[in-house]
Amino acid sequence: MTAALPDRLLSCLSSPGAMEDTSSQKSGPSKDTLGSPVPQETPAHFIHVKLEEYEPTDFSTKELILKKAREVCTCSHQTIITFLCRLFPVLDWLPRYNIKTQLLGDVISGLLVGIVSIPQSVSYSLLANQDPIYGLYTNFFCSIIYFAMATSRHNYVGSFGVLCLMVGQSVNRHLRLAGYGDDSSDSSPLPGNATSAGNGTGACDRSCYAITVALSLSFLVGIYQILLGVLQLGFVAVYLSEPLLGGFVTGSSLTIITSQMKYLLGLKIPRHEGVGSFILTWVDLFRYIQNTNICDLVTSLVALAIIVPVKEINDRYKEKMKAPFPIELLVVIVATVISHYFNFETRYNSDVCGDIPTGFRKPTLPDISLFPSLAIDALPIAVIGFAMTISLAEIFGKKHGYTVRANQEMIAIGMCNLIPSFFYCFASSAALTKTLLKESTGTQTQVSGLVTSLVLLLVLLWIAPLFYSLQTSILGVVTIVNLRGGLRKFRDTPQMWRLSRLDTVVWWVTMLSSTLISTEIGLLVGVCFALLCIIFRTQRPRAALLGKVSNTEIYEDQSTYKQLSSIANIKIFRFESSLYYANKDYFKTVLYQRTGVNPVLLAAKHPRVRARANTEAGNSKSFLGTGFDCLKQAKKRAEKPPADACPPSIDMHTLILDCGAMQFIDTVGLSVLKETYHDYKKIGVQVLLANCNPSIRHRLREGGWAGETGSEGQLAFHSVHDAVQFAERWYHVHQEESKEKQDALLDPEDLNFQVSL
């Protein structure tokens, strides 16, 4: 009767879908055959889908290094030009600059951004614990360097509030270590510590030492960013997700607002840094609230009442307005004039900017002795700086249809920190508010940055001394008003919660840790928590049983869609993640839950079935093992067999694993598949695979997921429908074979009973 099986297969199995045929088995296992036992008789009329793989290319590290070295070391006229054009993109686009169509937009945008940059440069200097002139230096030099080296046409690089906050915290910490007091008016180290004030800078007062720390920090930040760009590590920015960056910016904005409150109130309180600085600052604000300077408070409230409404009008009608109204500059000018003529400094003891020198100072070198203590501080500043720069560059690059090179942007922003560090500048990056202003006012290229630098040059050479009487409270107001964008993120959290609760949790965790702990630790906590969320998503992914859409070859989640039909005695299970060591236990648990069959427990309850399955596995190649032996009629037996001699009653004969959502499996995942195959085989259930990508097929083939490597293996199908067809028809054939065996053969026990009679 076994000889009749191939003839029946010829007549019954006529639909396409199987991966192998008889001819392929005769010639040995093909490359697509997976290593697990399968019945030798393969459906003869299934269309054999054999996808021939490309031969893997020989990879030689030595040859690759030599090839790259030859490319780098090859010196020719064309190579030099190409290298210079890639390093300085301005050489590529400036010769094609269209004066008629692009110059007007660049000039207008550059002038407006330059006007806005004047008060912000001065106010952000205060945030970085520096004199106002150094903020102007920073924005001036960065605009020129970024003009020459950037691939982005819309980014504005200069002082950025979050980075200024981080720079100010590092500077304040080193000032304390050097023996300077908390009061900014204190220009000498504490008694008994005079030798440590300069740290190699000689007779250096508080302002001198503060900028020395800041420029040394900027030098290290630039080195980090250039190394990341040269080593092609621009992909690092992808680990700073949008919710993470949004939470960090919002948390930093709250910290910045807190640090500026003392200027708005005219209080002289110490500047806190490190863990808990946010809370400690508010404690001091309420402790010394009775010492509020009424003049500073009134001018701050008046400035807020004027600037905020006008800024809101600018934002609301920006589409209709050709250019936003420069209310900040107007308020700064008016406040300076009023403070000068009413002599707020002497009459009301208000803090003012004081003397702001003109011109440029001689270049200087960073203080190498500060590098060990600044190395750790520079790392988060470098990461946040290039992340903000690349993010904004890619956003506006996609919007306006041009390509941005992330690694070149990293080199450009690194140079904007490295070179200006020799000219008394602190760390910088792309500034969000000024970049948005630049884009909205019609900028076309980075020529607008050159125009902005010319505006700042006028201030540096002639106008800066006129800001002597400008109150620091007004600068604090300018800083706070420009943080409205970060605070508006609170309004987006309900929508974010509806879209992704996990991303919202990342946002809140990063925001709270950046605010309540510290900016550096908050960034680290946010990155670690975001990575843990990714692991959590892959460790406990969705898993579902699939049903068929009527009259189609489409299979979808039965718990999500209606009107799906189940396949009789076949369970199709989809695991929507890669299978690796972290989710191996969850895979088995959810598989048993969805199918309702735990093969390990069933096999343990029926040990005799397991023994018979192991025995008959060596004598039979049938698809369902010993499942049909229990269908023999009891009347043919002399005595009734024990209850555990039959396998447990289950509602499936085949389990199909849809691997379409699996990107990879590791060795642990392969072991789990092996265990799954053998566990279900013991209770008479066959396991098939479907939708495996080439990398998974290669891993299964080489690892032998249910048998010896290279042996005739279980078929892995390119679609779920093919696997279903194969399972249905194969099961039908073996049912007929089992019935014929029952009719033609008598059980040996029955024969012995007849002989005894």
Image (tube, rainbow, N blue to C red):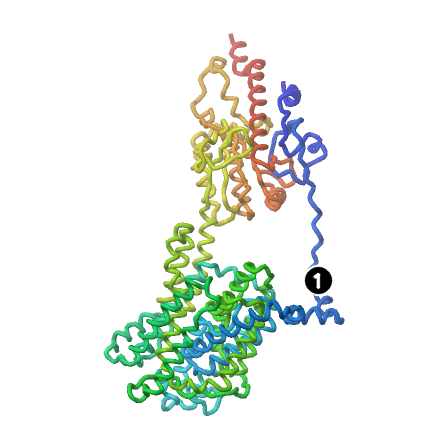
Q: Position of 286 compared to 744: left or right?
A: left
Of 489 and 666, the residue lying toward us: 489
| Residue 632 place in picture, x, y as percent | 50, 17
What amino acid type should be assigned to the residue bearing mark 1? Lys
Question: In the displayed image of the protein, which residue is found farthest to the right?
Answer: 76
Residue under numbered circle 1? 62
Give the answer, above or below, for where 752 lies relative to 711. above
Give the total of numbered labels: 1
Residue under the point 47% across and 13% down: 635
Splitting the image into 4 quarters, where does residue 150 fall? bottom right
Residue under the point 41% across and 68% down: 519
Give the answer, above or below, for where 352 lies relative to 57. below
| Residue 371 place in picture, x, y as percent | 50, 79
Identify the image quadrant of the N terminus. Answer: top right
Residue under the point 55% across and 69% down: 105
| Residue 409 place in picture, x, y as percent | 57, 67
